[in-house]
Amino acid sequence: MTEYFEIHDRDGPARRGELRLSESVRTPGLVDDYLVDAGSEWTAERDLPEGDESMLTVLPHRGLPGGTPDEVQEAFTVDYPDVDFPSAAVVSSDTAQEQGTDAYILSNAQELAGHAAAFVEAIIETRAAIPSDTALYLSGVATPGNVATLAYAGVDLFDTDKAVVKGTQGKYLTTDGEAFLEDLDELPCACPACQTPRSEFGREECAEHNEHVLRAALGTVRERIRAGRLRDYIEGQARHEQWLTATFRRLDQQYSYLEQRTPVLRRAEITAATDDTLRRVEIQRYAERVTNRYHCRFDKPLVLVPCSARKPYSESQSHGQFHDAIQYRAHLVSMTSPIGVVPQELELTYPAQHYDSVVTGNWTATEIEFVSDILAAYLESNEYPRAIAHLPGDYREIVERAGETAGVEFEYTVSDHPTTADSLANLASTLSEETTYMKRERQHNTLRAIADYQFGDGAGDDLFEDLAVESRYPKLRANSTDGEQLAMLVPEYGLLALTLAGGRRWVESDVPTKRVEIDAFVPHGSVLAPGVVDASEDIRVGDEVVIEGPKAFAVGRAEMSGPEMIDSTRGIASTVRHVEEK
Ligand SMILES: [Zn+2]
């Protein structure tokens, strides 16, 4: 039970929240001013401290050196008492378990800093062992350079110990590393301590500066989490220290840890500036869904075109020209890094219209491999009567590689650039014998394709077995043929929002339903975590969910992952869009 810690925003494993002491402490943040340590039980039999709401009390503990065998650690494990004030338990990553406290302090934190593999393993083990709505505290490790990556991994609480010690040693810290004070000609900072003239700036001022910069770095981290953009920041900032770069790359290898904590949609854009972006959960998840869940319903030739900087693509000038040449005679699929392939029905779907990449006209070897692998998988799972590549020369290697793997022969229609009059005329004449499809077919295919992508293979046919489409793209409404509304397309994310009737079809379909089981009450606006009895393991933030209890049937959107809904004692588990009393 966590009474004194609350999470407000999640961004992957990072969380922005507060320690609810009599004075609220923002997290990720510094906790030194709010800490009382009841001490180690090695030195004395400790009485249970009094504790009060203004401080986080560290309960009496036994710190054991790192590398202590598990059986020894277990033998010496302290049974923490239940207390009614804000408390923290000291645990080691090997033996951590739920203790009923608000925070957990990792005893071997200082041995982990600097060692990417050990750090990632310890954080993942500890996070798996303690409730998700409790704070994780790493003592004596924070620097302005490393807090963003540590918070990204899932650490909530820090202290100024290391920054202050470094200052007294004459090490001047910044978010891009550290320098010896004596080596600095000028002070590259505008904090109050750095107002001291360079000649009078000593170690005391240095320690003060380090603390200022650490506080500011944590402010940046919190704002990044709130905006859903911590990862973009890390990909640049972590590069200044090798072990931090290694840490976020090793975290990328822990896919399920990250995936469970990464929302299926965001308002924020993804900045694709490095090959590391290709390993982001959002990118991998899209690739997985477009190659496994999506299938093309058009019975027309495939036309591959380059993406446009403007999103959605169909609103760009180049795509307007492609459209004029194609005239509803082919299925348009855009090629892009870092997303891979985007069939026209999914152009609105997160993250297809939510990224911005660096365009140089040259692909890196990693991009070529990534995009051609996705294209090959796409071609293997979708059969087209013809395949046309209307792409500039730098895409040629990708298309040839994928075509070879999938056994697809491409026709090429671009002589120099895709939007020249010659190239466009070529594209139009290549399609001159083809028949056109109807607007209705396009709308139906779009809604069904999005349902497949969002809910799983087969959802488009199951949910929209009979379908009548209302309104204009992109604000499409899906009705049954007898006029009952089932869902609407949300243009910002290119995903469907279900009605109660749509939710019932989902429950009755063969597609696995994401369910939130609640107690006997009728939810209005939202369901809070304590009201959740059970939830599907695979629910992610942003997923559509069916909410059901003895008194209500509802549909809404998840604000927490399934495991977190079950685990948490605070916070909104899901919003509620429509509810019906039973
Ligand atoms: Zn300064």
Image (cartoon, rainbow, N blue to C red):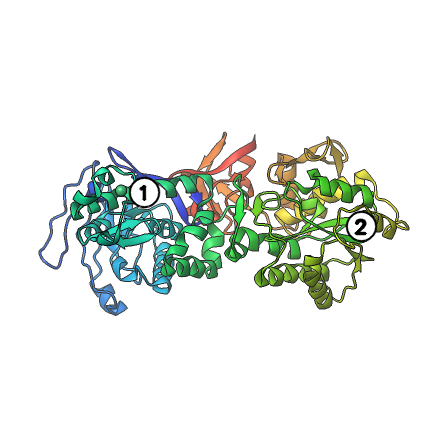
What amino acid is found at the position of numbered circle 2 in the picture?
Ser
Q: In which quarter of the image is the C terminus?
A: top right
Q: In this view, does 471 lie to the left or right of 32?
A: right
Q: In which quarter of the image is ligand 1?
A: top left
- Between 435 and 219, the one lying in front of the other is 219
Residue 183 vertical placement versus 477 (above, below): below
Assess disc 1: are there few (<14), some (14-19) or many (≥20) residues with their C-alpha within 10 Å of its C-alpha.
some
**Circle 2 SS class:** helix
> Is residue 548 shown to the viewer in this render?
no
What amino acid is found at the position of numbered circle 1 in the picture?
Thr
Mark 1 or 2: in front is 2
Q: Is residue 546 left or right of residue 534?
A: right
Mark 1 or 2 closer to N-term?
1
- Residue 551's tag is none
**Circle 1 SS class:** loop
Q: In which quarter of the image is the N terminus?
A: top left
Q: Could you tell me how many numbered marks the image carries?
A: 2
Residue 71 x %, y %:
25, 69
Q: Mark 2 points at which residue?
A: 423
Residue 199 x %, y %:
18, 44
Residue 265 vertical placement versus 240 (above, below): above
Residue 26 x %, y %:
32, 38
Q: Name the residue under label 1.
A: 2
Residue 501 x %, y %:
65, 36
Residue 552 vertical placement versus 245 (above, below): above
Q: In this view, does 555 lie to the left or right of 107?
A: right
Q: What residue occupies the far left of the structure in this picture?
A: 44
Q: In this view, does 198 lie to the left or right of 269?
A: left
- Between 450 and 554, the one lying in front of the other is 450
- Between 348 and 549, the one lying in front of the other is 348
- Disc 2 beta carbon < 8 A from ligand 1? no
Assess disc 2: are there few (<14), some (14-19) or many (≥20) residues with their C-alpha within 10 Å of its C-alpha.
many
